[in-house]
Amino acid sequence: MSHRELDYRPIVPRSELGAEEQNTIEVFQRARGSVVFITTLSQVVNPWNRSVFEAPAGTGSGFFWDAKGHIVTNYHVIQRASAAQIRLTDDRTYSASLVGASPEHDLAVLRVQSSLDAPAPIPLGSSGDLRVGQKVYAIGNPFGLDYTLTTGIISALDRSLSEETGQTIRDLIQTDAAINPGNSGGPLLDSAGRLIGINTAIYSPSGASAGIGFAVPVDTIARVVPRLIRDGSYRLPDLGLTTDQRVNKWFASRFERQGVAVLSVSPDSPAALFGLIPARIDSNQSFILGDVLLAIDETPVKSLMDIGHALESHGKTKTLTIFRKGEIVELSR
């Protein structure tokens, strides 16, 4: 049998990486240490001996918020969990406890109690000045494949997403960066490596990325997370009025307008300072409609949650648009 020399092809050297490629690598390397892999556990009852044990329930992503061991993730990642474990890039694993959660924003904060040498948190950016077409980077653990980077652009802003629970998450960033199950809770970064959002959901008939992902903007995160750390919960601001959705539906059907019927007003509340007039029952036990709130600073409202989100996004409220005795009235203060 004859022997022939093997004909190896030479390797062709390449030029330096392009500036955009190099920046992508640097953004990932700087941020990946702050991202954690989350495994949630749920309590399971053995049907044979009735013993209770914890079994893996799901996975997700999160990232360090500060040097005190606080980790931000999505509420839906830990929603039905009895416990959670986090794993760092160096494979260290820790138990984490729930500090607080806000289902309205799909945000939750965990904390590692041990003396963890926490990685530096990702620098905070802002989301109020984001623009469609801006490049973004998503880091997470899709399908359990840890520390995966996907890139894309911001494809839309100010999106709303309704969940199965009936909650509506508002002011979301829409991106075409691939977001898959397990990416939830991971950071969305801009080209400077700053945190601009937290990946929260995908729109997909198949359950896999279809080019439409959503992220909670960092301005919301920066407002809600400190409250969760301090108080364990976040309460949406309110005007100090009560309503009833049955009355609101009757009003919408009767007057062909969406609004919030004012049934009572708390003393010294913003509603009282604006001079809102509540409904009443007259001497004949008939229901007399009072003011119906239609908009806050030109933002339409049709529920107490709408009021809370409008107050939250606008800050100090300047005008209320109401329906009063058949007329549209604007109240200012």
Image (cartoon, rainbow, N blue to C red):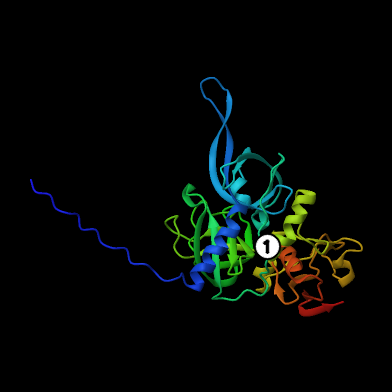
- Left or right: 257 in relation to 90: right
Residue 239 in view, yes or no: yes
Question: Viewer-proximal residue, 333 or 276?
Answer: 333
Count of marks overlaid on the render? 1
Residue 323: percent from left, percent from top: 76, 75
- Quadrant of residue 305 within the rendered picture: bottom right
Q: Is residue 319 above or below residue 116?
A: below
Residue 199 in view, yes or no: no
Q: What residue is drawn where x is 44% and y is 56%? A: 208
Q: Mark 1 sits on what residue?
A: 123
Residue 318: percent from left, percent from top: 82, 76
Q: What residue is drawn where x is 88% and y is 67%? A: 272
Residue 332: percent from left, percent from top: 84, 78
Residue positioned most to the right? 268
* Quadrant showing the C terminus: bottom right
Question: Viewer-proximal residue, 192 or 144?
Answer: 192
Q: Callout 1: helix, strand or loop?
A: loop
Q: Is residue 184 above or below residue 56?
A: below
- Left or right: 167 in relation to 182: right
